[in-house]
Image: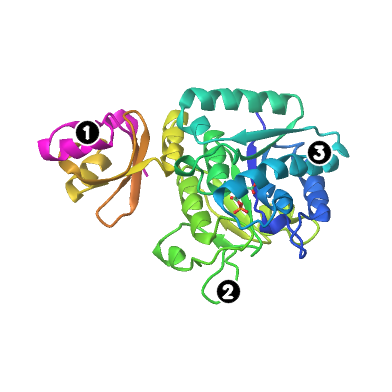
Amino acid sequence: MQKPVIVIKLGTAVITNEEGVISHSIIKKVAAEIAELFATHRVVLVSSGAVGSGKVFIQHYKGSITERKAAAAVGNPLLIQLYQKHFSKYDIPVAQALCERHHFSNRFQFLQLKETFEAFWQNGILPIVNENDLVSNVELKFSDNDELATLIAVGFDAETLVICTSVGGFMDDAKNIIPRVEKIDGKVMGYVQTGKSSLGLGGMTSKLTFTRLATSLGIQVIICGLAGKTPFADALAGTTGTTFVSQASNLKARQKWLASGSITLGTILVDKGAVKALRQRRSLLTVGVTSVQGKFAAGEVVQIKDEEENIIGVAKVKLDTAAIRDGISQKNVLAAHADDIVIF
Ligand SMILES: N[C@@H](CCC(=O)OP(=O)(O)O)C(=O)O
């Protein structure tokens, strides 16, 4: 039996100390615990912090896209050196994997990435992932590393996705951490704070959006902090942080990949009739499309939203943005085949 996959995502704020620099003692603690987990799991570590590590080298840094790219390119090797130093105490070599969106939206590239990660694990090497900020252009950037970690967790069919944040968990209106969430419903969404940490990109809204996707695809998600001696063991035992229970999913690997590729390329909004047809596993015809958002090509994966703008699923489309818009007036043109649609 293969060891289960666990994806651990560390945000910038959670590995940064009060002086605003990446904390060596936190990386040391994280390495000690991940080294233990590595004996029983295929671990992927997704770590932010490249921009945070490199921005001191950029004069008069203001945080423009170009400055962030430059800072990330300087910071990534520094960050990986730090991990390398601390994991070497446990004889665990680390591999740096800088990812871009096409590694996920193109199934062939994703399968290659997957094979390489399997080779890492077979050789006792820990993959440490970050976005390849230097070359990621604005339209195709991941929204943040919460998204990247989710794509990895879904693509690798992970058992658990751990998202570490400086607030230590998911809080209710009274700012108490909720230990366990069975299902992300309207009430839970209502607790989301829109504030973001000044050090990172992802706020709780993005965490919850990706958590909802991951749990709906059968992955347990834990949002936790790094307090205490054994933060991961504590969070996995359910004594700290918030555990979001995974929902039953009988989707096959390709459908999960389809679903995980959903997050950005574009959106098709559909009417009530189309929602009903899609739930009966029928194809999507342009007659049911009310509008199209974003820009996508034929063969790409887009999200499907209902009239209330809830994401109801994803589809690999047969037509590009313009052709679907044209099809809305021509009515019964096939926008996506039933086999290429996943409804959550
Ligand atoms: N790729 C960027 C991190 C982007 C990001 O998502 O940051 P965070 O919200 O701190 O997880 C970096 O390494 O600085």
Residue on which disc 2 sits: 175
x, y percent for residue 225: 68, 59
- Magenta stretch? 316-344
* Residue 44, above or below 116: below
Instruction: Find residue 84 and name its label.
Output: 3
Q: Residue furthest left?
A: 330
Residue 240 location in percent, x, y?
67, 61
Residue 210 within the magenta-colored segment of the rendering: no
Q: CA distance from mark 2 to mark 1?
A: 48 Å
Q: Nearer the viewer, mark 3 or mark 2?
A: 3
| Residue hosting label 1 | 323
Ligand 1 closer than 8 Å to label 3 CB: no
Picture quarter with the N terminus? top right
* Disc with the residue nearer the chain's start (3 vs 2): 3
Mark 2 Cα-neighbour bin, 10 Å: few <14, some 14–19, many ≥20 = few
Q: CA distance from mark 1 to mark 3?
A: 49 Å
- Image quadrant in which the C terminus is located: top left
Q: Amino acid at mark 3?
A: Gln
Is residue 342 rendered magenta in the image? yes
**In the picture provided, is 304 more to the left or to the right than 34?**
left
Q: Closer to the camera: disc 2 or disc 1? A: 1
Seen from this angle, which residue lies furthest bottom?
A: 174
